[in-house]
Image (cartoon, rainbow, N blue to C red):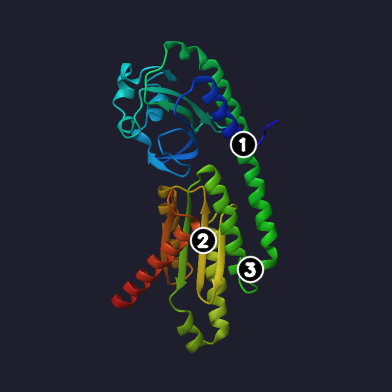
Amino acid sequence: MINDFAAAAQATMAFLRRRLGFKLWMVTRTEGDDWIVLFADDAGYGVTPGQSFRWTDTICSRMALGHGPNIAPSTRDVAAYAQAPLADRLPTAAYVGVPLRRSDGSLFGTLCGIDPQPQPLEIREELETVALLGDLLSRILNAELDAGTASRQADRAEVDATRDPLTGLVNRRGWDMLLAREEERCSRYGHSACVVSIDLDDLKFINDTQGKSAGDALLMRSGRALEQVTRGTDVVARLGGDEFAMLMVECDYFDAQAMLMRVQETLAAADVRASLGMAMRKPGYDLEEAFAMADAEMVRAKRSRKVLN
């Protein structure tokens, strides 16, 4: 029995190609206004896993809202589908699609197929089969997502031996490991994530003027403040010296902005001055690349603070 989401997705698309034809079958993820292709069985469109389109431009978004049927032998006969901008970019004359839902009923993505030619009206009789396959995929997906929570907890336990002795936070080695593990999950399921680079502004000055014990107290205070604003699934690390990092999993842009504001407020309340940079992991670049972007933003912020001072 296939109980792996990736294998189940591939088997489902292969079955539907044999049964219904169609040039392109996809399993997708919707995240904010991104429509991310997780898996594709493509015979001519040039669509590849990891590609991202604008969700509101898709026929799937209209299907999910109930603006059109799950199976449209001719999309030009369905006004909402004929007007979808992506139907021009990916020529679509026939459409099949069903939603994939999380355990709480919220939309995860879709199982869908498109073809550049209209199809026989009889394909509408396949709706029960396609809906059943979508439901089975959703069940396998949700089992894996639930297992992912346990997997993150196991990852955290594994890095207990790689903690910074002063702050108790994950060190550079643990950070690199957890970032790589989370990237695997993001790539597999299309999760979004946020990374933050943090550099304390005053550590060297305090060490030089008040002594190392005062500097250590600043580092410990900073670590406690950062841990206060994170969830159990998130990661806070001390990378070395006055450098800290944060990883927020399954975090969209608006959650990330709210979290960044809390970080700034909590650090200020703890009498910690720091420069911060944030970046989102999105289709097109991975978590390591996103962290490099966050680090560059932090450097710009630090330079700006020095100019102002």
Q: Is residue 33 visible?
A: no
Nearest the eye: 93 or 234 = 93
Count of marks placed on residues: 3
Q: Earlier in the sequence, mark 2 or mark 3?
A: 3
Residue 147: x and y, percent? 66, 42
What is the spatial separation of the Cα atoms under label 3 and label 1, in whole angstroms?
Answer: 40 Å
- In the displayed structure, would residue 61 be above or below residue 297? above
Q: Residue at x 62, y 64 (%)?
A: 174
- Dot 1 falls on a residue whose secondary structure is helix
The answer to which quarter of the image holds residue 165 is bottom right
The residue to which callout 3 is attached is: 168
Q: Earlier in the sequence, mark 2 or mark 1?
A: 1
Q: Earlier in the sequence, mark 3 or mark 1?
A: 1
What is the spatial separation of the Cα atoms under label 2 and label 1, in whole angstroms?
Answer: 32 Å
- Looking at numbered disc 1 in the image, what kind of residue is underneath it? Ala
Q: Which mark is residue 7?
A: 1
Q: Residue at x 59, y 38 (%)?
A: 6
Q: Nearer the viewer, mark 3 or mark 1?
A: 1
Residue 73: x and y, percent? 40, 17
The residue to which callout 2 is attached is: 246
What is the spatial separation of the Cα atoms under label 2 and label 3, in whole angstroms?
Answer: 14 Å
Q: Residues within 10 Å of mark 2 (few under 14, many from 20)?
A: many
- Dot 2 falls on a residue whose secondary structure is strand
Please report contact status of discs 2 and 3: CB closer than 8 Å, yes or no.
Answer: no
Quadrant including the C terminus? bottom left
- Dot 3 falls on a residue whose secondary structure is loop
Q: Is residue 195 visible?
A: yes
